[in-house]
Image (cartoon, rainbow, N blue to C red):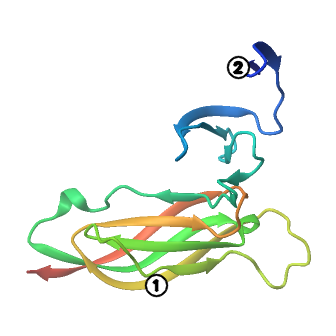
Amino acid sequence: MLVWDYDHDTWWYWTFNNHPHLWMATYNVNGDEVLYFADNQGGIFRFDTGQLDHGDTIAPFVQTQRLFYHEVGDEKRRLRYVRVTGTNEMTDILVAPYVNDETSATAGAIDLTDPNETSIIPRRRVRRIDFMRDFDWVQLVFTHLRRNQKMQLGPVHVGTEVLGVR
């Protein structure tokens, strides 16, 4: 990658272990520009600090859109479970359902490993976590508990039931 160095007033050719796919510039509290980039494997990195985010390791997460938002009518729903497909390389993920735009949620952890495995050969796992939350709409947040690791989520199934007319 060809980069202009303002401090030395020259161009530099840089190579990366993680090929940048997308760049984002922002500013810290001191007004200094901070660059973040994403690679094509789903990793997010702060430029020039290794795999750190303001000194902390990066915890990847995914937040869904509002599920069932356009189906709000006279019927109330209940979230019963979330079934997640992921790889055993992720070990653990946290699932947090935010119902009706609440600001906090009770999360549950899903373990994607198998204690009988002696080595980690990448395998897809399907795991389920049960909930009992009534809602009009819900957003799900999936957080990878192993920082600086790729989050490899597959299909997610949300199990709900209709409770009836309000």
- Residue occupied by mark 1: 130
Q: In this orientation, which residue lies closer to the viewer: 55 or 112?
A: 55
Please say if 38 is above or below 3: below
Please say if 78 is above or below 138: below
Which quadrant of the rendered structure holds the N terminus? top right
- Residue occupied by mark 2: 6
Q: Amino acid at mark 1?
A: Asp
Which mark is nearer the camera, 2 or 1? 2
Whether residue 28 sits left or right of residue 138 in the image: it is: right
Residue 2: x and y in percent read 76, 17
The quadrant in which residue 102 appears is bottom left
Residue 59: x and y in percent read 63, 61
Q: In this orientation, which residue lies closer to the viewer: 53 or 135?
A: 53
- Which residue sits at x=60%, y=59%? 153
- Which residue sits at x=39%, y=77%? 105
Q: Amino acid at mark 2?
A: Tyr
